[in-house]
Image (cartoon, grey):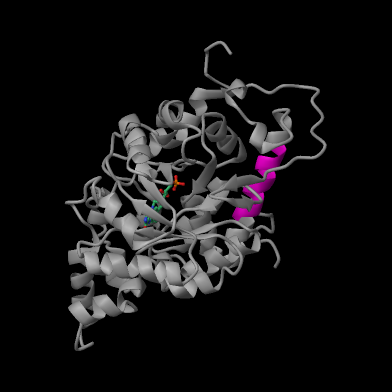
């Protein structure tokens, strides 16, 4: 696969250039859907800026000839600390959507998290990811039978974990999407897991005759669940033997509760600034949470990672693994080759940056390598 080049025949390296390519290529509604955040986009901006508030403190003369990016997560050895975020509706970016992203991830041994609102069924996505860990992200539908069916299907299809998104009791106030009158499901994208679900079909479309518009309306009615509480984690636990990760934790108290309620891991995340605007940046939430629960359950991190040093900062502040969303989706504008180019560049940057901190092995990154800008070490 040849690396994508820009119109003037230069390789596309910078994530800003991938973003610009997506903006030039995609219809406005689709680009804004991917790019934007909730409200005034305060949290979206804070997520990226937070990385500038922390300084890396490299140590010299340490022999970094052999750099090792490997980690162990949920009892699997992984080649890098990177996972791909659940991002729904990917056919609005490229016709091969999630299949292209998952194939790219699989080619690099990177775990892929399939969204509930993916444009291909969770089974079809799993099928392109032989031997690579894959997680299923659950938006807990407002119908327990459908929720149970999704989880059962994910387990049967070979998924390794359930990622329960807990910051989406309802959809954030996304002004650009509202202004563009853009709701991606209306394009037909994002319905695959529902239309292939026997329980959903039997309950909501028994005649099989619903139009696309009617079907979308039925899905919208049950997609999210505003009445979810911590007690429900026990119910989910009974449905599956897979590890359960809670995605969307910012409050330190919630990190502690996740441990108390038996979660197998958490993802410190504010949904890439797409849910509650004004929320603390994910990076600045991380050290408070890791101080309380590090070593008890794995702490994953997302929201704002764009470059290799960002990953090092998150790990130095207590993350065991990191997840990216928008960067790979911008790459998806050019299909699988684009995703692979974004990931390969990011990993080269990470490898270079790790060596330059004077640490040969990622598992040796710790708090001594980072300080709040201006603070002593
Ligand atoms: C998302 N995200 C998301 N999260 C989730 O749990 N289920 C989903 O279906 C989606 N869909 C989705 C679509 C798009 C277009 C984006 C950009 C994001 C959130 C995602 O998993 C992740 O938390 C953020 O993208 C991380 O922030 P960055 O890396 O985009 O800054």
User: Percent position (x, y) of residue 234?
Assistant: 29, 51
Residue at horizontal 18 percent and vertical 52 percent from the top: 226
In the image, taking residue 65 as reference, residue 2 lies left or right, namely: left
* Relative height, residue 11 to residue 122 (above, below): above
User: Percent position (x, y) of residue 78?
Assistant: 63, 51
Which image quadrant for residue 342? bottom right
Pick whichever, 300 or 265, lies toward us.
265
**Rendered-image quadrant of the N terminus:** bottom right
* Relative height, residue 160 to residue 168 (above, below): below
Residue at horizontal 65 percent and vertical 36 percent from the top: 363
Q: Which residues are magenta?
A: 342-352
User: Percent position (x, y) of residue 180?
Assistant: 26, 58
In the image, taking residue 57 as reference, residue 222 lies left or right, namely: left
User: Percent position (x, y) of residue 224?
Assistant: 23, 58
Taken as a whole, is the magenta stretch helix, strand or loop? helix
- Residue 176 visible in the picture: no
> Is residue 349 in the magenta section?
yes
Pick whichever, 264 or 272, lies toward us.
264
Residue at horizontal 66 percent and vertical 51 percent from the top: 79
Pick whichever, 214 or 335, lies toward us.
214
- Residue 152 visible in the picture: yes
Residue at horizontal 45 percent and vertical 74 percent from the top: 123
In the image, taking residue 105 as reference, residue 267 lies left or right, namely: left
């Amino acid at each position: 696969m040849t690396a994508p080049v820009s119109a003037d025949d230069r390789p596309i390296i910078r994530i800003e250039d991938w973003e610009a390519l997506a903006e030039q290529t995609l219809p406005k509604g689709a680009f804004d859907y991917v790019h934007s955040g909730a409200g005034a986009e305060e949290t979206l901006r804070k997520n990226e800026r937070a990385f500038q508030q922390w300084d890396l403190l490299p140590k010299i003369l340490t022999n970094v000839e052999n750099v090792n990016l490997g980690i162990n997560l949920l009892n699997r050895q992984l080649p890098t600390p990177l996972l791909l975020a659940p991002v729904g509706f990917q056919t609005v970016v490229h016709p091969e959507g999630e299949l292209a992203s998952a194939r790219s991830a699989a080619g690099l041994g990177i775990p892929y998290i399939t969204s509930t609102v993916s444009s291909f069924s969770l089974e079809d996505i799993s099928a392109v990811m032989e031997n690579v860990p894959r997680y299923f992200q659950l938006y807990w539908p407002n119908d327990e039978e459908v929720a149970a069916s999704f989880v059962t299907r994910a387990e049967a299809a070979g998924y390794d974990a359930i990622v329960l998104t807990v910051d989406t009791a309802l959809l954030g106030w996304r002004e650009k999407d509202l202004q563009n009158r853009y709701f991606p499901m209306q394009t037909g994208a994002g319905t695959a897991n529902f239309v292939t679900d026997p329980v959903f079909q039997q309950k909501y479309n028994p005649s099989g005759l619903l139009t696309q518009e009617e079907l979308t309306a039925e899905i919208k009615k049950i997609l999210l669940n505003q009445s979810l509480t911590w007690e429900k984690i026990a119910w989910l636990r009974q449905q599956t033997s897979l590890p359960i990760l809670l995605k969307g934790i910012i409050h330190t108290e919630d990190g502690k509760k996740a441990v108390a309620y038996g979660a197998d891991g958490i993802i410190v995340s504010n949904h890439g600034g797409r849910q509650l605007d004004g929320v603390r940046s994910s990076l600045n939430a991380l050290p408070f949470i890791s101080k309380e629960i590090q070593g008890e359950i794995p702490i994953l991190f997302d929201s704002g990672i764009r470059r290799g040093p960002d990953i090092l900062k998150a790990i130095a502040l207590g993350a065991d693994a990191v997840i990216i969303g928008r960067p790979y989706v911008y790459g998806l504008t050019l299909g699988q080759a684009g995703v692979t180019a974004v990931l390969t560049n990011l990993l080269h940057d990470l490898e270079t940056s790790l060596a330059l901190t004077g640490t040969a092995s990622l598992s040796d990154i710790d708090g001594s390598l980072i300080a709040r800008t201006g603070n002593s070490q």
